[in-house]
């Protein structure tokens, strides 16, 4: 069997996780990677066992063997590189956020349609098996009418003033930080699970640490950076560490979420609760195999992920018997499995339904981020304007 050949651009924190997830599929092979210099590319290729190393991503795009390209670069490079990937006629899987503005993400969406390439954006949290189960429960009316959706996405890797990363600088990370970086995941996940779209927002943002000490030298995402002889420079910060956002969905359902990257003890806690007219559900990414189901007239339950207890639709996304817990890398593998199965089956991105997030979802996310920023600036409700051509 001919394997689908892949190239990965960018190998910081996220690129290697893509490579590992893709390797687990069996029918896809990462044959090349590109980095900011040939030296780094060769070192990474040797570490990760990838045959070809490119010091310039444009050379990777000229490699005719490569059919699909993953864009795992910092945010400010997403737009230009995604565009070039599409123009090179290759399928594209981009990290989020899709671009730096909704004008750019709309352009990418249109371009991907025009060239008929399969396009994905890495909203990976919706791929947890238990969320597929919850999605089918909601579709089957097991919670009743969904009335409220609320939750948060909390991290602590930027808690100290000495924590610094490219995501904090608008030139590299974008004008929004916590919202674009993690709020985008929260919104995608709850929209997927409920089948509803966020159409209006009211936001309050804050930069809890307005001046940070940036270590001299490169620091990786989630990387500890304090050593006794570390030198720092002071940097003013104007992207948000925190945001709380009231939301309204397209059917009038209300909700609210908080994001923070300065919440001690919370590592990657994307959580939400859904209150329906019959029952409630609560999920937390740090304990992803558990789904709390709340009732009024009888004892509450905790569903522990188990294919034997899942609906037919959800069973396909879980790969081990109950108690053999699956986590973050497994959800990412599900993303890759769905994306590459679509390509292997020769499906048409213009006609066939996808079971992974696409550039349309990436564009919607950019439009929600824009509305949140506008709402914070003007201190009023703002409608999400999903600009189409
Ligand atoms: C950093 O906040 C980060 O790596 C995000 O960029 C990812 O999208 C999220 O999955 C984990 O945290």
Image (cartoon, grey):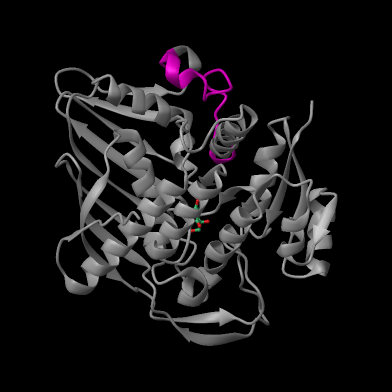
Q: In terms of image quadrants, where is residue 148?
A: top left
Q: Residue 46: x percent and y percent? A: 85, 54
Residue under the point 58% across and 48% down = 93
**Magenta span of residues:** 309-329
Residue located at (65% from left, 53% from top): 15
Q: Is residue 375 left or right of residue 227?
A: left
Residue under the image location 78 percent in, 51 percent down: 32
In this picture, residue 66 sits left or right of residue 133: right
Task: Estimate the x, y position of residue 23 in percent, counting from the top left.
Answer: 72, 37
> Height in image: 39 above or below 215?
above
Answer whether residue 320 is magenta in the image.
yes
Could you say which is closer to the camera, residue 238 or residue 283?
238
Residue drawn where x is 49% and y is 16% of the image: 307
Which quadrant of the rendered structure holds the C terminus? bottom left
In the image, is 375 to the left or to the right of 211?
A: left
Q: Residue extending furthest bottom?
A: 233
Camera-nearest residue between 317 and 91: 91
Determine if residue 389 is in view.
Answer: yes
At which x and y percent is residue 323?
A: 53, 22
Q: Residue furthest front?
A: 114
Residue 278 sits above or below residue 71 on the image: above
Quadrant of the image containing the N terminus: top right
User: Residue 168 location in percent, x, y?
Assistant: 47, 72
């Amino acid at each position: 069997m001919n394997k689908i050949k892949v190239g990965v651009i960018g190998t910081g924190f996220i690129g290697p996780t893509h490579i590992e997830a893709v390797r687990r599929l069996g029918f896809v092979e990462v044959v090349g990677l590109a980095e900011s210099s040939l030296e780094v590319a060769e070192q990474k290729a040797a570490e990760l066992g990838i045959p070809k190393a490119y010091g310039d991503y444009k050379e990777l795009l000229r490699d005719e063997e490569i059919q699909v390209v993953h864009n795992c670069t910092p945010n400010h490079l997403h737009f230009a590189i995604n565009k070039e990937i599409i123009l090179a006629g290759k399928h594209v899987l981009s990290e989020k956020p899709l671009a730096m503005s909704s004008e750019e993400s709309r352009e990418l969406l249109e371009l991907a349609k025009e060239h008929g390439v399969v396009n994905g954006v890495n909203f990976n949290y919706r791929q947890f098996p238990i969320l597929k189960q919850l999605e089918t429960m909601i579709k089957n009316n097991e919670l009743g009418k969904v009335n409220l959706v609320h939750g948060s996405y909390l991290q602590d890797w930027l808690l100290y003033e000495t924590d610094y990363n490219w995501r904090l600088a608008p030139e590299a990370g974008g004008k929004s930080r916590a919202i674009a970086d993690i709020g985008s995941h929260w919104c995608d996940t709850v929209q997927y699970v409920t089948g509803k779209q966020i159409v209006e927002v009211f936001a309050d943002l804050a930069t809890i640490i307005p001046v940070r000490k940036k270590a001299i030298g490169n620091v990786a995402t989630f990387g500890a950076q304090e050593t006794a002889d570390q030198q720092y420079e002071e940097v003013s910060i104007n992207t948000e560490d925190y945001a709380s956002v009231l939301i309204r969905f397209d059917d009038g359902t209300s909700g609210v979420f908080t994001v923070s990257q300065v919440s001690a003890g919370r590592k990657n806690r994307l959580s939400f609760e859904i209150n329906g007219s019959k029952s409630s559900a609560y999920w937390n990414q740090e304990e992803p195999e558990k789904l709390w189901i709340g009732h009024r007239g009888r004892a509450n339950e905790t569903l522990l992920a188990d294919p034997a207890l899942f609906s037919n639709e959800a069973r396909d996304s879980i790969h081990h018997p109950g108690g053999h817990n699956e986590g973050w890398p497994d959800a990412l593998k599900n993303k890759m499995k769905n994306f590459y199965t679509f390509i292997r089956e020769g499906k048409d991105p213009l006609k066939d339904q996808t079971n992974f997030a696409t550039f349309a979802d990436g564009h919607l996310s950019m439009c929600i981020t824009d509305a949140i920023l506008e709402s914070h600036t003007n201190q009023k409700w703002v409608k999400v304007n999903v600009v189409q051509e």
